[in-house]
Image: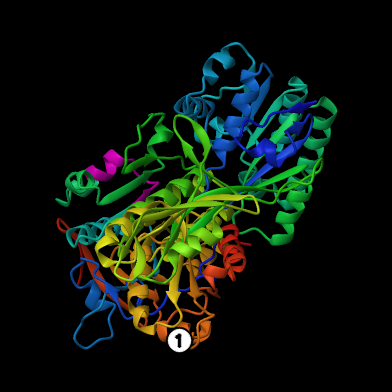
Amino acid sequence: MIKKSFIPKLDDLLGGGIPEGVSVIFCAYPGVNSEAFGYQMLNGRLEEGDNGFVFTNIAEPDTITYEFNSYGWDLETMLEEEQVFFVDGSSHFIGAPPNGRYIIEDYSQIEEAVIKAIRDVPNGIGLINNLSTLIDYLGNEDTLNIIKKWNEIAKEKKTTLVYIFTEWDYDKNFIDEIKNSVDCVVHLKTIEERVIIGQGFMVAGASWTKPSDIMVLFFVMQPGGVKVYIPKILVTGPYNAGKSSFVKAISTKSVSVDRQALGTIPTTIAMDIGHLDYKGFFADIFGTPGQERFDLILNVLSKEAVGAFVLVDSTAPETFGRAKEMIRKCRAEAIPKIIIANKQDIPGALAPEKIREMMKLGKDIPIVPAIATEKKGTTEALDVLLTLLYGD
Amino acid sequence: MVSKNMIEYDSTSPVKSDMNNCVESGIPGFDKFISDDENGIGGIPENTSTLIYGPPKTGKSVFCYQFMYHGLSKNEPCLYLTTDYGIKQLQQRMMDFEWYLQGYMQDQMVYIIDALSSLSGTKMTDTSIYKPSSVQNPTDIMVKLGVGTIFVYRKSPKFRSIFDSLKILLAFNPDMLVVRILKAYIKRIKEAGGTAIIAHTEGTADIEIEEVIKKTADNVLRLDGELIKIERMPGIRKNEAQYQITDGGLIVL
C-alpha cells in the first residue's frame, strides 16, 4: 500500500508516494529546516488516522507539541487520544519532568525504547529527531547497527520510519553508509552566495523507484509548513546586450512588456517575462531593462531571485563597465550569476576569457558564449545554472 | 549547496574580506595591544573568527558585549547567539555597564538567537530580530543562524557576530557535536563576510576537545582575570597585557 508523504511535490518525485514499512531520511545541510519535513509527514499521517510516535533528543515533548502548534497542527489532541506518543530522550538530560510513553535516562536505553515504539504503531509512522545527535553519543558503528535493526523491525511492522539528519562535518564514507542503510534519501540543500538565499529538496535515491533528479525549491512557513515555490531567475545586462532574445530563447513562453521603438533599436522599457521549464526545473524569468533609470527594478527583483544571467554584448567592451555595475547591484542582494557572452556570431566578438580579463572577473564566475537570436549557447547556460543551484 | 569555492568574488566586490582591515573592538587599549603598527592602529582582523577563552568570571562575556556595542554605535549590525544567558539577563548584564540594547533592537540592528530561555520552560515568542532556540537542538540553532545571517548581511555586509558561549552547549551535547556546530557557525559567518567572536570557558570540555576548539578559530585570546594573552593571531606576535574590568567594561592597561 502506498502512503502519501504530505510534502508537496515529493510524492511526484517518488513515483506516487511511499510504500509501507520503508525508511526515509531527510539529510539536511546545516541551516536547512529539516524538522519541518518530519513534522509535516507525521502530522499528515496522523490526520489520515494512522498512529505514530516521535523520538526526541533535541527538545522535551512540550516544546515539540508547541512547535507543531506553531505550524497549525494539533498534536496535543492526538496525544490525549493516544494516537501518537513520545519517546522522551530529552527531558531527563535537561532536568525537566519526563513526558512520554518511554523515557530515556541513559543513551543505552534508546535502541530498545524505539523498538518498542515501532512495535506499538504497526502500519503507522515513527519520527526520529535527531539522528545526528545520536551519532556522537553512541559512535558511528553502533548508530549504524541500531538504524539497521530499527529499519528491519519497521519493515516487518509496516511502519514508516523517518529520520532527521543534519550533515555536520562527518566522514564522507560514514555519511554514505548512513544513506545506504535506509530505503529513501531526500537531500535538503541550500542555494548560497555568501548567505543562504534559497532551499531545495532532491530525492537522491529510493529503493522502490528511480526518482526524478530535479530540485524543488521550498520555504517553511509557521503556520503552514513546507511550501514549494517557483523561483525567479533574473536576466540582466547593459542596453542592447540581447536580454529579450535570451529570455525568449530559454523560455517555454515569454512576453515582452511595453516593448517600444526608441530610436533605431527596439528596447524593453518595462520588462520581459518568461517561464522556464528545463529538465524539470521550473522558474519564472524576469528580464530587466538595461537603462540606468530602471535600476530600481533590478534592485527589487534581485531580492527575490535565486540566480541571474548577466548578458554582455561581446562586441561592445565599452558596455562592460555598466555590466559590472549591474553585477554589483545583483550582488548587493547576493545571488549566483552567470555571464552570457552574447553576439558571438558578430565579427570582432571577444572570446569569453578575454571578456573575463577585461571585466576583471574571478575565475569561478562562469562565462558562457552564446548567440541568443539563434538559441546557441542557451542550453549550456541553463546547464551551468542548474549546476550552480543544485551544487555537488 | 553552492560552495564558496565555486563562485569567487572579483576584486571590486565591496564586501571582499581584507586581512589588512581591522574591526575596532571598542575596548580601550586593546586595539593598540594587538597591533604591531607603530601608530597603534589595530583591531581584530575583519572577517576572521576569534576564540576568547579562560576561567569563569574573567570578562569573556563583557568582551563580547563591548565588541557588539561598539559595532552597533558604528552602525555595524550584530548577530548574537546567546547560550549562557537568556535575552532578559543579557540585557540586564549589559545595563550594568550602561550599554543599552533596547534601542538597537528596536532599530533592528541586532539579531538575537536565544538558545537558553527555553531551558527554563518559558515559551518565548519570536519576532523579526529575536529567535528562541534550544541548546539541545543544534539543527534548529543553525537554521536560525542561517536566517539571521541574511538579516544582518542585508543591513550591512560589514557585521559582527557573537557566540557566547560553548559552555552550556557542551553540558547538553556530546563534545564532538559542539565542535561540529562551532565549525558550521564559523563557516557560515565567514562566508557572509562577518567577524566572529566565540567565548569559551576553560575546563568545560575534555582536554583534547579544548585543543580542537582552539584550532578551529583563526585567532585565540586567553583571559585569566589579570592578563589578556594573544595565543594566536596571524601576523601579530604573541603578547600579553594586564587588563581590568571596570564600570565601563574592559580596559587593557
Note whether residue A341 is visible. Answer: yes
How packed mark 1 is, by other alpha carbons closer than 10 Å (few <14, some 14-19, many 20 or more), is: few
Write the residue at 53% across / 68% down.
A373
- Horizontally, is A2 left or right of B186 in the view? right
Q: Amino acid at mark 1?
A: Glu
Secondary-structure class at tag 1: helix
Residue, disc 1 = A357
Image: B134 above or below A336: above
* The one of A172 and A324 positioned closer to us in this rendering: A324
Image coloring type: rainbow
* The one of A380 and B53 positioned closer to us in this rendering: A380
- The x and y percentages for residue A164 are 63, 41
- Horizontally, is A239 left or right of A243 in the view? left
Note whether residue B57 is visible. Answer: no
Q: Which residues are magenta?
A: B80-92
* The one of A148 and B39 positioned closer to us in this rendering: A148
Write the residue at 35% across / 36% down.
B126
- The x and y percentages for residue B83 are 40, 46
Q: Chain of mark 1?
A: A
- The x and y percentages for residue B67 are 26, 61
Q: Is-magenta flag for residue A5?
A: no
Image: B168 above or below B60: above
